[in-house]
Image (tube, grey):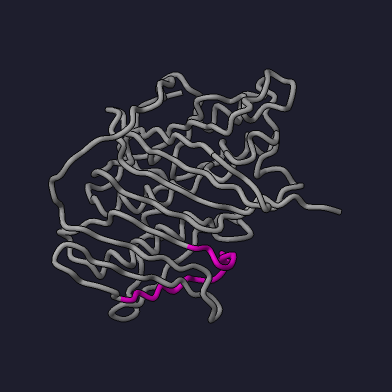
Amino acid sequence: MTDANTDAMTDAVAELIAILDLERLEVDLFRGQNPKTGWRRVFGGQVVAQALVAATRTVPDDRPAHSLHAYFLLPGDPRTPIVYEVERIRDGRSFTTRRVKAIQHGRAIFATTVSYQVVEEGLTHQPAMPAVAGPEGLLDGKALAAAGCTGMPEAIAAYFGRERPIALRPVDLNRYLPAGAGGRAPDPIFNVWLRAASALPDDPALHRAVLAYASDMTLLDVSLIPHARSVFDPAIQAASLDHALWFHRPVRIDDWLLYAQDSPVAGGARGFARGQIFDRAGNLVASVAQEGLIRPIRD
């Protein structure tokens, strides 16, 4: 296992950059392609990231995105390109607002509002980063998949072992062990280190888009921890319903980031989860909130 982020771009990262390079159809109309993954529906983080790219291309470079609020309306069809329609809501002296609608087969599958702000100085404070093991020495995806001795279910091992543009290193694997095999953390808390699987170009907007892509990974699953279930459980129907993301500081996602996640409440077949994303220096670079469907499937 190596911890170095090699300069050679992996195929998965190159594919992610390609799908984030949207085709401009008209002044405020863009088209995004889907990766050839074989998935039955489009990954929610992909739609969030592509919508952010579409909105950003209509905003001056001097004002980066600071927040995004989105709803997933319908499952995306991975066989069909997605059209992104940008509406220019406001262009102010300090803030710019855009609304984006993602369309497939003549229907909206996703909608988001993105806010941008000129860079300003101001008061600052933040929570401390959780005291957890660093990414060095933790098992990466391929090592997790190969470590059959962990007792991890095959579907979960395959998820972490799949070649992907985002490398994942969970801090604690007990969450994925069968009940009674090493114990299961009762609290809905999960910490995972993540980063792009290889170095990215020096484009701040691209790093924010890739972070938006990664922010939908593993988050909904946290709300199932107290119930000894996971989104990989065939008896659970799981899907993201909405997603909110705040960018607090400039970020490079090709260096390790800690995604500290928790779920304070679940009910009504929905789970609510939050995430704080810290860089290696302990700076809080982004916050995430999401509600998702966690519906038990009954006979």
Residue furthest to the right in view is 299
Q: Quadrant of the C terminus?
A: bottom right
Residue located 58% across and 53% down the image: 292
Residue 48, x across and y down, in percent:
43, 59
- Image: 118 above or below 113: above
Say left or right for 4 vs 78: left
Say left or right for 190 vs 156: left
- Image: 153 above or below 114: above
Q: Does the magenta stretch include residue 76?
A: yes
- Image: 229 above or below 215: above
Residue 224, x across and y down, in percent:
64, 40
Residue 278, x across and y down, in percent:
34, 34
Quadrant hosting residue 3: top left
Say left or right for 224 vs 171: right
Residue located 40% across and 32% down the image: 258
* Residue placed most toward the observer, 104 or 119: 119
* Magenta stretch in the rendered image: 71-87
Q: Does the magenta stretch include residue 80?
A: yes
Residue located 72% across and 48% down the image: 236
